Image (cartoon, grey):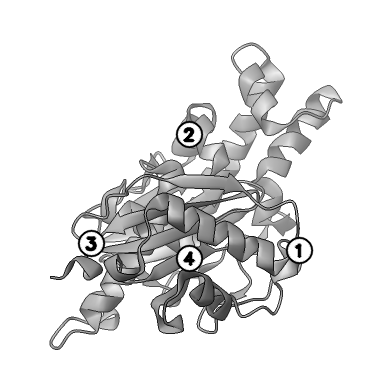
């Protein structure tokens, strides 16, 4: 294998910052991770400038990597490389990001690809984290919203028994609202406010949990809802493991016991992400090299693997 094909440049585009690293093909290990906040100047040019700078800091060299894969939030036209987001990063709406980034990286547009961020998270855990070797896995990212992804034998699936439309659970009906109303940062904040009359950030509520019962109760409540959602909405998919990531997962000790209590009679295992902030970057590498292998003659297809 030539050195050019042994790594891919991975980007993780978040709501407040962007990270980049080179990811190796053999074990999906990451090189030095470079990260910066989103640009203060909200233009597509400043955004691609940021990506170019991060690529350079991560060690990108045009002739030494296979290409670039970006983990991005939705809605995003992954095939076209065009953002359809209006609620966040609105300055990228309708922009051909593949074309703009190819110019900055001095490479062919076909070497720039895109992946949903929740899918990237789960693929990272499948390839190098908490879901290695697992036949059926689901990934949930817990933050301002709840992202979800599903994989069978290491390959993403977006439809099939037990998989909601497009693999998304955030907007599924649940207890008179939707799932995201009960499992998110705003759910924890709302629970704490109901108990105390005070509005606090989730990080502050987590810090207060060892001392204040209301703070512990807010995480307990979310954990119970998490367990119920996994039991009722993911049960048909029959995951062996559900990997939990996102900012809230860093406080797993505060909500995991209550979630596991709901699932006590289930065979489903809950695991906190092993890779955390690096999961999506590793997942970009997994997605890139899976696609490369599937393009080879006689390679098994994703459809044949997902049985």
Q: Which mark is residue 25?
A: 3
Q: Is residue 11 left or right of residue 217?
A: left
Q: Residues within 10 Å of mark 3 (few under 14, many from 20)?
A: some
Tell which of 12 and 180 is nearer to you: 12
Verify CB contact (< 8 Å) between mark 4 and mark 2: no
Position of 71 relative to 197 (above/below): below
Tell which of 267 and 107 is nearer to you: 107
Q: Residues within 10 Å of mark 2 (few under 14, many from 20)?
A: many
Tell which of 59 and 86 is nearer to you: 59
Judged from the image, the secondary structure of the residue bearing numbered disc 1 is loop
Q: Residue at x 65, y 55 (%)?
A: 179
Rounded to the nearest angstrom, the CA distance separating label 2 from label 3 is 33 Å
* Residue denoted by label 2: 256
N-terminal of the pair, mark 1 or mark 3, is 3
N-terminal of the pair, mark 3 or mark 4, is 3
Q: Residue at x 73, y 43 (%)?
A: 186
Residue 182 in the image: state x and y as whole percent: 67, 47
Rounded to the nearest angstrom, the CA distance separating label 4 from label 2 is 30 Å
* Residue 7 occupies quadrant: bottom left
Marks 4, 2: nearer the viewer: 4
N-terminal of the pair, mark 1 or mark 4, is 4
Marks 2, 3: nearer the viewer: 3
* Residue denoted by label 4: 70
N-terminal of the pair, mark 2 or mark 3, is 3
Q: Residues within 10 Å of mark 4 (few under 14, many from 20)?
A: many
Q: Which mark is residue 87?
A: 1
Judged from the image, the secondary structure of the residue bearing numbered disc 2 is helix
Q: Residues within 10 Å of mark 1 (few under 14, many from 20)?
A: few
Marks 1, 3: nearer the viewer: 3
């Amino acid at each position: 294998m030539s050195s050019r094909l042994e790594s891919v440049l991975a980007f993780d585009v978040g709501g407040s910052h962007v990270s980049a690293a080179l990811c190796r093909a053999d074990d999906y290990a990451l090189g030095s991770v470079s990260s910066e906040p989103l640009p203060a100047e909200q233009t597509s040019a400043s955004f691609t400038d940021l990506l170019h700078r991060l690529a350079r800091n991560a060690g990108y060299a045009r002739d030494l990597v296979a290409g670039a894969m970006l983990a991005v939030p939705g809605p995003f036209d992954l095939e076209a490389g065009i953002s359809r987001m209006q609620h966040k990063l609105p300055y990228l709406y309708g922009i051909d990001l593949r074309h703009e980034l190819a110019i900055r990286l001095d490479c062919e547009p076909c070497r720039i690809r895109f992946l949903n961020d929740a899918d990237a998270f789960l693929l990272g855990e499948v390839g190098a984290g908490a879901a290695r070797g697992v036949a059926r896995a689901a990934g949930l990212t817990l933050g301002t919203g709840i992202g979800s992804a599903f994989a069978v034998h290491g390959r993403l699936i977006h439809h099939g028994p037990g998989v909601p439309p497009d693999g998304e659970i955030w907007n599924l009906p649940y207890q008179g609202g939707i799932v995201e109303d009960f499992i998110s940062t705003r759910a924890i904040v709302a629970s704490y406010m109901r108990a105390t009359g005070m509005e606090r950030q989730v990080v502050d509520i987590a810090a207060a949990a060892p001392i204040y019962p209301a703070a512990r109760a807010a995480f307990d409540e979310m954990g119970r809802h998490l367990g119920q959602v996994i039991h009722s909405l993911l049960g048909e998919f029959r995951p062996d493991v559900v990997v939990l990531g996102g900012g809230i997962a860093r406080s797993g000790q505060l909500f995991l016991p209550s979630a596991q209590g709901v699932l006590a009679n289930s065979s489903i295992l809950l695991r906190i992400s092993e890779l955390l902030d690096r999961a999506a970057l590793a997942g970009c590498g997994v997605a890139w090299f899976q696609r490369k292998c599937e393009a080879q003659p006689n390679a098994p297809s994703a459809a044949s693997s997902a049985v």
